[in-house]
Image (cartoon, rainbow, N blue to C red):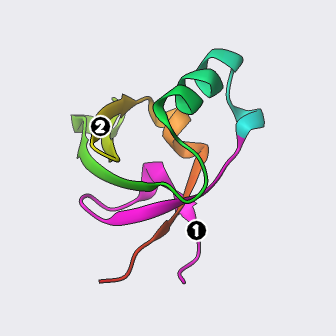
Amino acid sequence: MQTPLSLESLPHRQRATVAGIAWTELSVPEARRLRELGFDEGVGVEVLHRATLGKGPIACRIGRMTVALRRAVAGAIHVSPIAG
C-alpha cells in the first residue's frame, strides 16, 4: 500500500480509497456535507477534473456520483492510491 496523500494532490484519473478525513480541519457544514455524500474511510474516489489555474474546485467521483469540492476540503481528505 502506498503512503496516503490528500485528495487535492491525487493525480487526475488515479483511483484511490479514502484513508481518513481530518474532520477538525473542516467547518461543521463542510463535515456534514461530506458525511451526507458518503465520504468515509474505505470509500473509492477518483479525481475527474480540476479547475484551471489551480484555485478552483475539484470534481471527483465517489461511487457513482460526481461531486465538486473546494480545494481546502479536498486537502482534508487523505487517500491511498490504488496500484494498477
Q: How many marks?
A: 2
Residue 12 is one of the magenta-drawn residues = yes
Q: Out of 84 and 55, give the one closest to the viewer.
A: 84
- Asked if 5 appears above or below 39 in the picture, the reply is below
Q: Position of residue 24 (x, y in %)?
A: 78, 35
- Asked if 58 appears above or below 82 in the picture, the reply is above
Tell me what residue is drawn at x 37 percent, y 82 percent.
83
- Asked if 32 appears above or below 84 in the picture, the reply is above
**Callout 2: few (<14), some (14-19), or many (20+) C-alpha neighbours within 10 Å?**
few
Q: Position of residue 17 (x, y in %)?
A: 48, 62
Kindly identify the amino acid type of the residue bearing the numbered disc 2: Met
Report the disc number at residue 4: 1
Q: Position of residue 15 (x, y in %)?
A: 33, 65
Task: Tell me the distance, in whole angstroms, between the alpha carbons under discs 2 and 1.
Answer: 23 Å
- Asked if 3 appears above or below 65 in the picture, the reply is below
Report the disc number at residue 73: none
Q: Position of residue 37 (x, y in %)?
A: 47, 31
Q: Extreme right residue here?
A: 24
**Callout 1: few (<14), some (14-19), or many (20+) C-alpha neighbours within 10 Å?**
some
Kindly identify the amino acid type of the residue bearing the numbered disc 1: Pro
Stretch in magenta: 1-22
Figure quadrant of residue 84: bottom left
Residue occupied by mark 2: 65
Specify whether 34 is left or right of 47.
right
Tell me what residue is drawn at x 27 percent, y 43 percent.
64
Figure quadrant of residue 41: bottom right
Sequence-wise, which precedes: disc 2 or disc 1? 1
Tell me what residue is drawn at x 26 percent, y 58 percent.
12
For the N terminus, give its image quadrant.
bottom right
Q: Nearer the viewer, mark 2 or mark 1?
A: 2
Q: Out of 81 and 5, give the one closest to the viewer.
A: 81
